[in-house]
Image (tube, grey):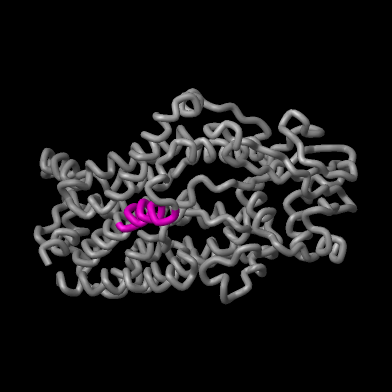
Amino acid sequence: MVKKGMYILFGTVLLYAILVATHKGEFWPFSIYPMFSQAGNPWTRTIVRDINEPPDEQWKILMKQELPGKAFALNEIGINQNDLANFISKNEQWNANQINGLRKYFEDKLNDRAFLIFKVQGRLSEEKSDSVAVEYTPYIYIRQDTTLFNPALVESVARASHP
Amino acid sequence: MTFFARLFSFDCAETKGEFLFYRIFEAIIIYQIIFYAWEWALYIPRLGEVILPLGMANYIDVSFMFSGPYSLINAALVSIFALLGFLKKGRYFYLLAFLCMHLQYIARYSQGEISHGSNFTATALVTFAVAAIFISHRLKRRKVAFGLFIFLIGMGYTSAGLSKLIGTGLSWVDGRHLYLWIGERATDKLSQNGAFQLNFFQELLLDQLWLATTILTIGVLSELFGFLLWFRKTRWVQATILIGMHFGIYISMSINFRAYFIILLIVGYPWARFFDYLLNKNPNSSLNAFLARQKAAPS
């Protein structure tokens, strides 16, 4: 029986290894558990601000104290912040489906509100190496009938597929 | 050979306490599976587009799950198959529950995030399925499933530690890396809740670089020695260290690995011996008689 148990174990580990090796380390629930393995790299997340007016034409990078409007908690729409942050940072081509996918997150609130989604980027400060420098780049403005992209970040794709 | 005999506990007979412990472990895993299935079922209709295909989503378009009742139907199937598996109504129900659960996961986590919060729970389901399919004797099935699960989670922790050393090297433990992650998590909390305040421990870490470096060093060492879960003598020590590590992650980075805490609390300690102690104190109890009947059920 020990031999049979060993065969089952080796077979399972072999299947595990083949699946993770051919799927970039992840085939749920099998994983090489690479979380936090790339230490020191800059990160990109998102925050959402509840604002009335679209950003000015410069779409300039801001510091935290300069952020316009009010903070919008994703709890209000029941969306996990990891989903929004990854949707924004991993999306390379904004076609109509992807824009609609993003708008679907906010659909309950777009009747009477407008939102500005910021890309938030953090890195170890160059001036003071034991502190983190964080900057906020306006990225997408959405309201009921409009989706505007920061032209410096997604110039051609957004214009071609604007819903 | 001796290592595997001990891993699967083939070197000793199964006691009533061990039988009770295993069924409680199995029940908690099934509860977690059903909980995740329904939690994700209610969330999936909020999604609109696949950004990062994971697992089988590399081969099938799971966007059909985003509209209509499919995520709810799938959660119902997971629940039914998992319960039938638990009640030992057939050898393939755990496998069916797992396949439906995989579909639920790849639909829920199609937005770019690679979540590991449910990995150990589903790994346990895989071991139940494998043991049910390949082992016909019920007693041995329990032993193989549990031993296989212990092996895979020990391997998972050690793999996580090695990934850090391969991905970054020994400098991974530099406390400034923890500062970056605290900043990242602070932004996440701000995004989720609209406000965020550092806790006392986070402020202390940001003030004392040596402490942040020490915390990361302890963290990676805890993971590297994850394989100590494989051995009965060191299992409770390693489980305690890993629970401490997860608590450290919780207070320093506000990440709550809820299911991992529960699983380590269950598998890390000699609960079976404790149950045997209680059962032996009341040898004529109805629970004793019930367990004797269940344990002796035909294979």
Report the number of numbered marks: 0
B57 over B291 or under it: above or below: below
Residue B214 in the image, given as x and y percentages of width and height = 36, 34
Instruction: Tell me which secondary structure the magenta stretch mostly adopts.
Output: helix
B107 over A88 or under it: above or below: below
Q: Is residue B186 visible?
A: no
Q: Which residues are magenta?
A: B155-167
Q: Along the line of sight, which residue is nearer the eye, A158 or B278?
A: A158
Please state, as top left, top right, bottom left or bottom right, where the N terminus of chain A lies in the image: bottom left
Relative placement, left or right, of A151 versus B201 is right
Relative placement, left or right, of B20 versus B166 is left
- Residue pictured at 42% horizontal, 47% vertical: B259
Specify the quadrant of the image occupied by residue B19.
bottom left
Specify the quadrant of the image occupied by residue A33.
bottom left
Q: Is residue B212 visible?
A: yes
Residue B158 magenta-highlighted: yes
B225 over B55 or under it: above or below: above
Residue B132 in the image, given as x and y percentages of width and height = 30, 70
Please state, as top left, top right, bottom left or bottom right, where the C terminus of chain A lies in the image: bottom right
- Residue pictured at 45% horizontal, 51% vertical: A37
Residue B184 in the image, given as x and y percentages of width and height = 58, 40
Residue B48 magenta-highlighted: no
Specify the quadrant of the image occupied by residue A32.
bottom left
Q: Along the line of sight, which residue is nearer the eye, A61 or B81?
A: A61
B207 over A91 or under it: above or below: above
Relative placement, left or right, of B164 versus B224 is right
- Residue pictured at 48% horizontal, 24% vertical: B207
